[in-house]
Image (tube, rainbow, N blue to C red):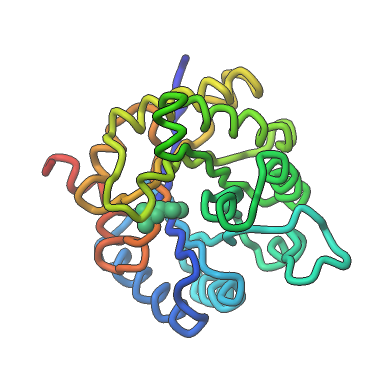
């Protein structure tokens, strides 16, 4: 398959960390740090995914100071409006200029009972509102043992893509559940194997052109010390970073992975 140039994407999923005041301080420092190091945002795209209550503050800061950082939400409702207490509409996220939204993170699947069908409905909701879904898929340790490395993520993605609108951008994040927050990252070869299989699903469902254009990320215990290895793989286009995205210098170093490719 011909590979179109894909801009690497480093995304920081803050999960339930940092309130809006801490978010402002963090985003300011991140922007200064990257500016100081002459980071080219056209070369490696960077986005943060703060909690909902931070989004307005982060938007105001990024737009007010014309920062090149992007931002997104960690979830959205499958509904657009109505009697859904506690839910957040994609319309609200679009009104905040949220470029992205994470959908189907394993913590939502595990703790909030999100099914593949719900994930597909949320992907459809994101596209209805012009937001790029970052679709998370990944297997547990038991899945890995029972079904091998790519069966579960491939099946999850196949269902999620049923919600995707034709011709609209998606990002896919392969996050093995056993690697999240464990300090036990997948090897770059393991990540490549599954990311390649996920790209093949995109090709099958949406065609070769979409598959070649779609960024497929790896997530799970990504750090400055292992990022370059993942990004050397042909089908890994970036990372969805959890814990390390809350450490300023570490995250800035992950963003600048090209500067330490030769150091591994
Ligand atoms: P860690 O980087 O903390 O393992 O988390 C990964 C993750 O879940 C990002 O969405």
Query: What is the residue that sits farthest to the left in this orientation?
Result: 263
* Residue 41 seen in this snapshot: no
Residue 245 screen position, x and y as percent: 36, 62
- The quadrant of the image that shows the C terminus is top left
Query: What is the residue that sits farthest to the right in this orientation?
Result: 82
Instruction: Answer with the quarter of the image where residue 194 lies.
Output: top left
The residue positioned 28% from the left and 34% from the top of the image is 188
Residue 51 screen position, x and y as percent: 55, 70
Q: Nearer the viewer, residue 49 or 260?
A: 49
Q: Seen in the image, is 74 located left or right of residue 238? A: right
* Residue 83 seen in this snapshot: yes
The residue positioned 52% from the left and 32% from the top of the image is 153
Q: Seen in the image, is 115 located left or right of residue 64? A: right
The residue positioned 67% from the left and 51% from the top of the image is 131
Residue 259 screen position, x and y as percent: 20, 48
Residue 62 screen position, x and y as percent: 51, 71
Q: Seen in the image, is 94 located left or right of residue 32? A: right
Vertical side of 196 occupied by 60: above or below: below
The residue positioned 31% from the left and 64% from the top of the image is 34
Vertical side of 118 occupied by 146: above or below: above
Instruction: State which image quarter holds ligand 1.
Output: bottom left
Tally of marks: 0
Query: What is the residue that sits farthest to the top in this orientation?
Result: 1
């Amino acid at each position: 398959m011909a590979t179109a140039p894909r801009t690497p994407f480093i995304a920081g999923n803050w999960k339930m960390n940092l309130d809006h005041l801490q978010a402002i301080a963090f985003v300011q420092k991140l922007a200064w740090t990257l500016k100081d190091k002459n980071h080219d945002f056209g070369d490696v795209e960077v986005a943060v995914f703060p909690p909902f209550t931070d989004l307005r503050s982060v938007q105001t800061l990024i737009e007010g100071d014309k920062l090149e950082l992007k931002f997104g939400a960690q979830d959205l409702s499958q509904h657009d409006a109505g009697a859904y207490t506690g839910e957040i509409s994609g319309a609200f996220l679009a009104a905040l200029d949220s470029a992205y939204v994470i959908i189907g993170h394993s913590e939502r699947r595990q703790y909030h009972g999100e099914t593949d069908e719900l994930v597909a409905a949320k992907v459809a909701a994101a596209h209805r509102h012009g937001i790029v879904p970052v679709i998370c898929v990944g297997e547990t340790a038991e899945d890995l043992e029972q079904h091998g490395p790519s069966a579960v993520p491939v099946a999850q993605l196949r269902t999620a893509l049923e919600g995707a609108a034709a011709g609209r951008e998606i990002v896919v994040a392969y996050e093995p559940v056993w690697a999240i927050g464990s300090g036990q990252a997948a090897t770059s070869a393991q990540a490549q194997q599954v990311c390649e299989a996920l790209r093949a699903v995109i090709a099958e469902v949406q065609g070769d052109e979409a598959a070649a254009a779609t960024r497929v990320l790896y997530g799970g215990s990504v750090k400055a010390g292992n990022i370059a290895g993942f990004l050397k793989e042909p089908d890994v286009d970036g990372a969805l970073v959890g814990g390390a995205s809350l450490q300023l210098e570490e995250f800035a170093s992950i963003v600048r992975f090209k500067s330490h490719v030769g150091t591994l």
